Image (cartoon, helix red, strand yellow):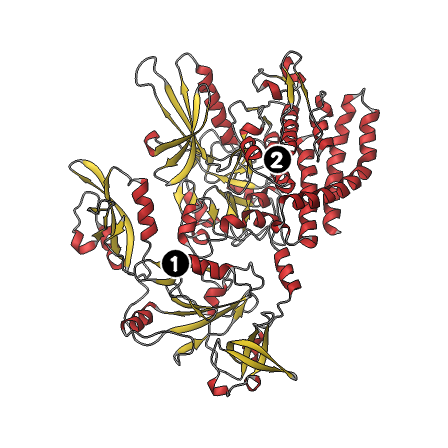
Amino acid sequence: MQVITEQTCTEHLRLLRSQENGQPVCHYILVPYDKISIIKRYEKGEKISITNCYRIIEYRDEKGKVRRASTYGQNPSEKLSNWINKQYGPAAIDKYTTLVYVEDDIRLCTMQRSNLDHLIGLSYQFHNFEHFYYIESLKDESNSKLAFCAGVKCFDRVIEFNGVNIEGDSEDELLNRIDKSNVLTIQLLVCSPATYAHYKSKNKHIHSNLETVKVMRPVNDKLTTGSEQIRSDEYCAVRWEDDSGVSTVKQSAVRKPPNSIRLFEQRMVERGTNYRNGQIILIGSKSDCEILRYTNTSSNREDDTNKISDTNRRTQHATSKIKSNKQETKQNENIHRVRCDGCQSRYIQDDCYRCLQCLDFDLCGECFEKRSENAEHRSGHMYVHLKTPKELFGKSITNLNDEVNLTKIKKYFTSVEHTDIFCNGCSMEPIVGIRFKCDTCPCYDLCLKCVEEKIITLQHESTHPLIVVDQNCLPEIDMNDLKLDDVLGQGAFGTVYKSRWLSKNRQVACKILNVPPDRLDLYESFLRELGAYNELSGAYILKLYGYAHELPKYNGGVHKCALIMEYMGQGSLKNVIQNKKLSLHQKLDMAWHVANGMRKLHARNMIHRDIRPDNILVNDVYTAKIGDMGIARSMTTTGDENLTMIGCQPYMPPEFYTGIYNQSLDVYTFGLTLYYIFTETGHQFDLLFRKISLSQESPVFNDLIVRCINDRPKRRPSAVEIEATLNLYRRTFNKFISTEHPKYEQYSIDRMNQIFMNSYNKLRLRLQEEVTKELSICSSNTDDESDNEHTPRNFVVLLQWLIQSTEQT
């Protein structure tokens, strides 16, 4: 496909839906920014003059024929949509920007980062047809954003990056240049759109040493007082060629007359009795140049590397190209372009939790589950859960700070009634206004008044997070809004497809269940799975976006039901273990994810009954999530119950066959899953005697596995204890490699595993010494199982103490 219609910098890309001959049709159009308001004034059904308002995009197809970017139907084809989004973009100008040239507006903006991972608050965009880079948007025009304070403006044309002209760079070349930049100082030469158009029309070049360039005062994260031009030129900031450090020197130290010193020139500079080669990166007063002064030794670089958290390491490969490229963001639909205020990850993958009581405070799923806190933020605050980027409660959002705050949420829920939901604080029924659901307590809801008055009843505590829940948690989706693609899995009555949710343009997994009229139990299973997902929400529980169903077209026909879930790119845990070579560190992470999800299930008085490698799904950044809630159900008590014998027999414990069991059944199946993760082999199951056996010992966590698969349910650890145990090893090892092996991620898998085993064995010996007394209590009371309930509680307290003491040392 070849472009015919070229987009100008003043034109927006829009999708226009209309009708022709009674059929729906859609067109891709280019609309000048000053015509958008005219289009918005037209009412539905009115005719619009194409020549006055917009241009329909034309292209040449593979056979050389000229075609319009128009298709019949409510939505364009995926092929056309992908091509359009690759070739065209938003306008590089808006109503606040002019192309009328008055005078030069060229600025050299300098930003000093605190570390190599520090965001400066902007993103770049490339205009495909006029071939220039520009500032797509500033995230937040406030003093907390370096780019804004340094003098960068929205829609500025970018000419130079750290003294190098990037106008001829391809997108990949610019990304590579940014990725390889190992200096803390970022300098952008930018100009206004009018200045850029003027210079290009005159065939003139823009560069840093033009007399009209305004050299703006440098800023850093401590000095963000607003942009202003430098008025003095007595000193220079020099970046040394041998170690990339920056020093402040007088102009007289540069081997060149002061009036002929130019920015970004390489010069010999006098330092004591010697001369060193360096690059002039700033000319100004001493205080201005001192902002950029630092020594970039290898130890400093290692310190910066150590600041990258474990979560950031796992998501780096998924987000490394998102620094300045909008197309990359479109390809990864699950990345929120906000920093996690818990682990300081540059971007948040999958689930984002925004606090409604703190200013601009966001947490990734892992930090939320860990109940991260700081001086101002507390885990018991109010949150909204953004399951997908730029969307909340099924509606699109463009500015997180402006649209997602308590004031706007109150307005959104004004007079909204939550049918059949009562407040556990004041007993209001139904709850009117905002409904807050406790993320810890099962079936516990509060109204806004009770939250603001800090009402606490039943088992609820002030440290429990409160999530805003919409009136319709799981929306019904039209079957025609789903495009089914490849089959991901298949069973006797249902099939899972890789699918596209057309109206959202989102990749999803669609589980289709065909219910014959004589199999109402399948429909009950569908409703049970829907109810389980409706009750649960967490970083390590598979997300459900909604459901769909299609009634039989005739008596005796099949009732088609569908669950629309998040798509997990790596497939099942079983598939990952069989086909990927993973380090023990990665396996521990995924084991902890599953334990965290199981702990959350049990906290909600639920039992899964089918935790095994086939039902654990893994995404592209190797986050493991528990799925397939088809046979999950709520427990009325915490003790044993008479339950149906539904489950995968090779994973079931002895009590399953009696029909009387509790949540410890999940612990048993988790133990066998843990065995599979670390041995990469399955257990043996004797169908005749209903017994399982292990062919080998696991290299790690063998003691935990043996405890999990104990035949006596009360001898098994709780989900809380399992999660705490795995978390202790995770956090200890993460701290160990950050200090002792900062280049750990570059090692081979074998070396990674050797380092892990050394750390594991040392911690295991220490842990065994600390818990010997606790386990001896358990051994001395084997005949009285009621006393064993004392051990898990003490064991968890001990683990929590060990985690704290390990972090302190």
Residue 702 - label = none
x%, y% of residue 215?
45, 76
Q: Is residue 153 above or below residue 790?
A: below
Dot placed on the residue nearer the N-terminal end, 1 or 2:
1
Q: Which residue is mark 1?
A: 125
Q: Which residue is mark 2?
A: 457
Between 751 and 421, the one nearer to me in the picture = 751
Q: Are marks 1 and 2 in contact (CB under 8 Å)?
A: no
x%, y% of residue 676?
63, 30
Residue at image location 33% in from the left, 67% down from the top: 193
Judge the density around disc 1: few (<14), some (14-19), many (≥20) Cα neighbours within 10 Å. Answer: many
- State the image quarter where residue 727 is shown: top right
Residue at image location 42% in from the left, 50% down from the top: 328
- State the image quarter where residue 19 is shown: top left
Q: Is residue 42 left or right of residue 729?
A: left
Q: Secondary structure at mark 2?
A: loop
Q: Is residue 269 above or below residue 686?
A: below
Q: Is residue 614 left or right of residue 205?
A: right
Q: CA distance from mark 1 to mark 2?
A: 52 Å
Q: Is residue 355 in view from this perspective?
A: no
Between 700 and 432, the one nearer to me in the picture = 700
Q: Secondary structure at mark 1?
A: strand
Give, as a three-letter code, the residue at label 2.
Thr
Residue at image location 42% in from the left, 75% down from the top: 208
- State the image quarter where residue 116 is shown: bottom right
Q: Is residue 403 left or right of residue 783?
A: left
x%, y% of residue 101?
29, 73
x%, y% of residue 274?
64, 82
Q: Is residue 30 above or below residue 635?
A: below
Q: Is residue 379 above or below residue 685?
A: below
Judge the density around disc 2: few (<14), some (14-19), many (≥20) Cα neighbours within 10 Å. Answer: few
Give, as a three-letter code, the residue at label 1.
Gln
